[in-house]
Amino acid sequence: MLSALLNAFRVPDLRRKIIFTLSIIALYRLGSYIPVPGVPIGALTDAFSDPSNPSLVMLNIFSGNALSNFSVFSLGIMPYITASIIMQLMQGVIPSLQRMAREGESGQKRITQITRYVCLGLGLINAIGYLFLFQSPTYGVQLTPEIPAIITSIIIVITLIAGVGFIMWMGELITQRGVGNGMSLIIFANIIAGFPSAILASATTQSIWMTVIIVTVVLGVIPGIVLIERAQRRIPINYAKRIQGRRMMGGQSTYIPLKVNGAGVIPIIFATSLIFFPAQLAVFFNVPWLTSFSDMLASGPLNWAILFGLIVFFCFFYTSMVFNPQDTADNLRKQGGFIPGVRPGVNTVQYIKNVLNRITLPGGIYIACIATVPAIIFTFTGNALITAFGGTSILIMVGVALDTMSKVESQLKQHHYEGFFK
């Protein structure tokens, strides 16, 4: 591991990408502590230290504690994630979006542009909602009296929307010029940022031994998660021999690698975003019954059942979006490849679909268990550290770390250096 890191910094282009990525993440974390104009610093710290409102507590975790600081990045990455979910679902319903998705890079650019506008619209709704909520008697945030309240409110809303746009820009910059997926790395940084305070709070307010046990269990579970994340089902492929000019082509054997968890952390992010979408609506409308409903979705048996089902659903949904058996079978046929014992064409498509379904179901159940079991344990133990060290957080961190390491690995291999994975 250490030698691979040293090798990464020996490659000039990779070194620049790593430094650029770390710089953008540091800039993002700095913005999480800059409060919006007109709001006293630390006005919400005490309110968010009480885990009685699970909806806002979870939203605060995914914002990297920026929400409790009421900073310029209070809305975090959730508006963009929600907008991405909406666009993914709409592609299966709206024919024009389906055509855009098939147009290649130009179509994806237009879909990305629409996603940005949807994200800013959701950011506007959330910004107004948070402004009204935090000025309610429950939180009692007082705006500065030197400026009329309406002007201060407009400045706050504009600042929060600008923060959402800036986060989108930083995430896309990391994806284009850095290492790894920018949005995923921002979520990764947000989750990591809450660990030190969570460990300290658990050790000081609750049992030190319980804190040690939880940390030890988490560290012991991580290798198992890594093992499953790297697991593959390999479909063997043979290429028929053919003569092209004076050269003999084909006759080789390879395989199609299908990961057990082919969707990665996307289903759990999508499912979590959908579950906490009512919490975002409750923040905006501040209706008691909607707040109660969002809190009920945020924890308890209903949360466990819905989260489990949504994760399994999004595993199948996202896998079908990124891997098309029909296209794979067509490409094999054009290149003279075939699966041993399976006829080309319809039989090959059906075979790949069956294999994909057989490995997607256990993969979906696996990440659904990882996400729900810690929430169940938290209900019976009440240790807030489990919320920060929950299965969702660990799975996202491990998945993002593996994805980033794989991309660094590929660049190290190009320069004939030894990578992370042996």
Image (cartoon, rainbow, N blue to C red):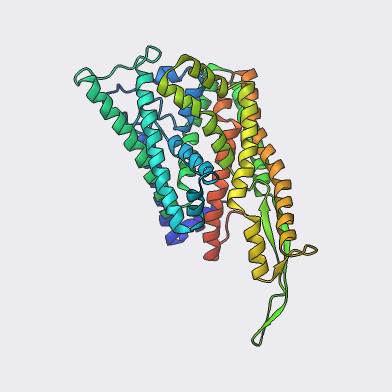
Question: Residue 199 vs residue 262: left or right?
Answer: left
Image location of residue 278, percent across then percent down? 50, 26
Name of the residue lying farthest toward the left: 146
Q: Residue at x 50, y 22 (%)?
A: 201
- Rendered image quadrant of residue 379: top right
- Rendered image quadrant of residue 351: bottom right
Q: Residue at x 48, y 39 (%)?
A: 81
Considering only vertical position in the picture, is 145 above or below 87? above
Name of the residue lying farthest toward the front: 95
Q: Give the tally of numbered discs.
A: 0
Considering only vertical position in the picture, is 66 above or below 20? above
Name of the residue lying farthest toward the top: 137
Q: In which quarter of the image is the C terminus?
A: bottom right
Considering only vertical position in the picture, is 272 above or below 347? above
Q: Which of 74 and 40 is in front in this view?
A: 74
Question: Residue 372 vs residue 178: left or right?
Answer: right
Question: Residue 293 vs residue 421: left or right?
Answer: left
- Rendered image quadrant of residue 107: bottom left
Q: Which of 176 and 212 is in front in this view?
A: 176
Image location of residue 51, percent across then percent down? 51, 18
Specify whether residue 137 is in view.
Answer: yes
Image location of residue 137, percent across then percent down? 37, 11
Specify whether residue 216 is in view.
Answer: no
Q: Which of 247 and 404 is in front in this view?
A: 247
Image location of residue 338, percent across then percent down? 73, 66
Name of the residue lying farthest toward the bottom: 246
Q: Residue at x 74, y 47 (%)?
A: 358
Question: Residue 167 vs residue 59: left or right?
Answer: left
